[in-house]
């Protein structure tokens, strides 16, 4: 595994101890932000590819992975996640980054670029945009918050495949075990559970959940000069081709887009097409 150092820092509101991986390098800094139910391990494969050329800062958002769970489930929302990211960057004395965000992490990247544009050079948005499809949101609601403990890693891999199999065409048994190892954790009693606080489901309880604001197009228009790479799973049920086309049409700055065959929500970012697109984009804008 690519080496990194462990970072512990206080959340933006000062209430929690949070965790991040810091992969050292002399190159530009990238901030990699995971999706709703994932953690920093989600980027292990991409980190192995980019490490050494870029400094990689990869946080566990509050309530995920090694970051402290918030006792108030209503605090699992993007505005507080973003404040946590500013706290992390300030602790590391990092002024500017290129943001790579999957799903929720991409929403965070857009908020960060809109509110403090001088600190975000460019963005890679993985299967997310200013508008999302209801079918994807409804599917996510069916599994978020399930806190059942699984007996072993084999059961965890099978559970991951049951949830995500339609979005990860062709992933073999080894791939699903790796997916489970990145997504789950062992319990003190010896079982396996998903590595997130089940209370994050509270943010998706409303018709217009806090995780996805109802209309982000005005904010997207504020980002019009930022270089953007959009990565979409070709069978995504969250980000439509029409939304990507509208993103391109409304954007004045550099905008690249690729689709990943056999992937829904969201690509793993180890796919050759994704890797090639990220390499080219970062060489030009990162």
Image: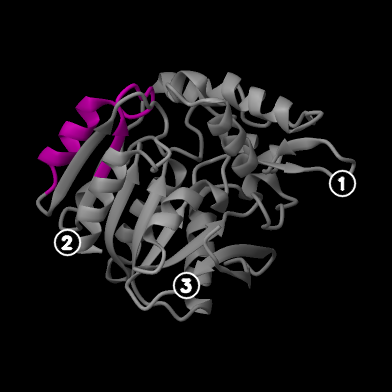
x 64%, y 41%: residue? 181
User: Is residue 223 among the parts visible in the rendering?
Assistant: no
Could you classify mark 3 by the number of other residues whose Cα lies within 10 Å: few (under 14), some (14-19), or many (20 or more)? some
Distance between the alpha carbons at the discs numbered 2 and 1: 46 Å
Task: Check disc 2 and report its element: helix, strand or loop.
Answer: helix
Q: Position of residue 160 (x, y in %)?
A: 61, 27
x 66%, y 51%: residue? 65
Q: Quadrant of residue 206?
A: top right
Residue denoted by label 3: 89
Q: Nearer the viewer, mark 2 or mark 3?
A: 2
Give the numbered dot on residue 284: 2
Q: Position of residue 50 (x, y in %)?
A: 37, 60
Q: Which residues are magenta?
A: 230-251
Horizontal side of residue 269 vs 121, given as left or right? right
Residue denoted by label 1: 188
Inspect the magenta stretch and tell me whether residue 205 lies in it: no
x 47%, y 31%: residue? 208
- CB of mark 2 within 8 Å of CB of mark 1? no
User: Is residue 276 among the parts visible in the rendering?
Assistant: yes
């Amino acid at each position: 595994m690519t080496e990194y150092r462990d970072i512990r820092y206080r959340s933006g509101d000062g209430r929690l101890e949070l965790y991040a991986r810091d992969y050292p390098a002399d190159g530009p800094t990238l901030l990699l932000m995971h999706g709703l139910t994932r953690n920093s391990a989600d980027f292990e494969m991409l980190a192995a590819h980019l490490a050494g050329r870029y400094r990689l800062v990869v946080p566990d958002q509050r309530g995920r992975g090694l970051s402290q769970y918030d006792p108030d489930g209503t605090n699992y929302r993007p505005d507080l996640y973003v404040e946590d990211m500013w706290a992390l960057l300030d602790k590391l004395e990092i002024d500017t980054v290129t943001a790579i965000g999957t799903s929720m992490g991409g929403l965070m990247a857009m908020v960060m670029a809109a509110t403090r544009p001088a600190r975000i050079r460019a963005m890679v948005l993985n299967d997310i945009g200013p508008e999302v499809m209801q079918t994807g949101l409804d599917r996510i609601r069916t599994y978020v918050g399930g806190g059942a403990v699984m007996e072993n890693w084999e059961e965890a891999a099978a559970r991951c495949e049951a949830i995500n199999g339609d979005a990860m065409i062709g992933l073999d048994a080894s791939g699903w075990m790796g997916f489970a190892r990145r997504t789950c954790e062992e319990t003190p009693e010896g079982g396996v559970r998903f590595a997130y606080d089940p209370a994050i489901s509270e943010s998706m309880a409303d018709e217009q959940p806090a995780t996805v604001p109802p209309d982000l197009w005005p904010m997207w228009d504020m980002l019009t000069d930022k270089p953007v790479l959009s990565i979409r799973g070709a069978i995504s049920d969250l980000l439509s081709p029409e939304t990507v086309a509208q993103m391109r049409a409304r954007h004045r700055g550099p905008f690249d887009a690729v689709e990943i065959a056999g992937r829904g929500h969201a690509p793993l970012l180890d796919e050759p097409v994704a890797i090639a697109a990220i390499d080219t984009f970062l060489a030009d804008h990162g």
